[in-house]
Amino acid sequence: MALFILRALLFPLLDSNHSIHMRPLFFHAIVLLAFGGTASAATYYQSFSFPDGTTNLGDGSVLATGGGTTAPSVQGGQLQLTTLGSGGGTNSFSIPAISGSSLGWSAVFRLTFIDAAGGNPPADGLSFNYGSAVVGALGAAEEGMGGADAPENLSFEVDTWMNFDAEQGVNISGNHLGADVGQLAFTNGPILNDGGVVSGLVILSWDPLDGASFHTTGLLTDANFSNVATSFTPSDNHTFNISARVGGANETVLIDDLFITTVPETSTVALLGASGMGLLLRRRRR
């Protein structure tokens, strides 16, 4: 329900390039209206509004680097997870457990990939993970999480290497009892062209009944998966982790306006969603 409301509120605001232009406060308000801000829903929000070079966000999250590449930090009011021209390593941004996640959660954030013309094609991609990894785990970027690091895990993956490769595209996967469950949903295709820039929204959700949903805007190949059955074991102790890496081929990955919430009461979400639609309609009429 929350995912449907969020798409209804945000998609009409997309421009021809599938980007959203609005003040961060308005963006935050729209997400709150969609997901609800009730006592029954725990939330995490990060706007990355810190000076350039900040690596400690002061909210319990951890920016980690495996070395060999520029460490992740805030740049220009966004989280720069990997850096164009700096190859050879994995970085991650992890968030401690959020109460109630085992009953379902939703997440939304802005995602930007940037590549430079003339070098190797962009690489390698990223994943958004919900699972048993410890805070600070590096992860395996576009391949999710290794079974040793997260025996139970659900991963939403974007693989940018390389154009027209059979593995490139968007994917839902995960681990159960330490074993890779394989591709639960997959669309093959390029994410961005050599020297290109793509930017848009990533909208994710999972709950025990409806499974996993994964939608993106602005990529050359967008995710459009709804109600995908999953087999991992959820837990309120599970963490959230965004993992990205680069090699000899590389790219800049930017994350902004990350919002995660557990599932609130359905009636409250519906009421707030209806109010949000009224707000949006009033804004578009001006």
Image: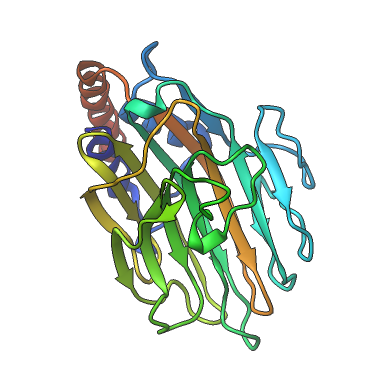
Task: Identify the residue shown where x is 64% and y is 46%.
Answer: 137
| Residue at the image position 25 percent from the left and 16 percent from the top | 268
Vertical placement of residue 29 versus 222, above or below: above
Q: Nearer the viewer, residue 120 or 136?
A: 136
Determine the image quadrant of residue 221: bottom left
Residue nearest the viewer, comparing 29 with 184: 184
Residue at (42% x, 46% y) in the render: 177
Q: Quadrant of the C terminus?
A: top left
Residue in front for this viewpoint, 10 or 106: 106
Asked if residue 273 shows in the view, the reply is yes
Q: How many marks?
A: 0
Rendered location of residue 101, percent (x, y): 40, 28
In the rendered structure, the answer to whether residue 24 lies left or right of residue 8 reads right
Quarter the N terminus occupies? top left
Between 285 and 224, which is closer to the camera in this rendering? 224
Tell me residue 71's x, y (percent). 76, 55
Residue at horizontal 62%, vertical 45%?
A: 93
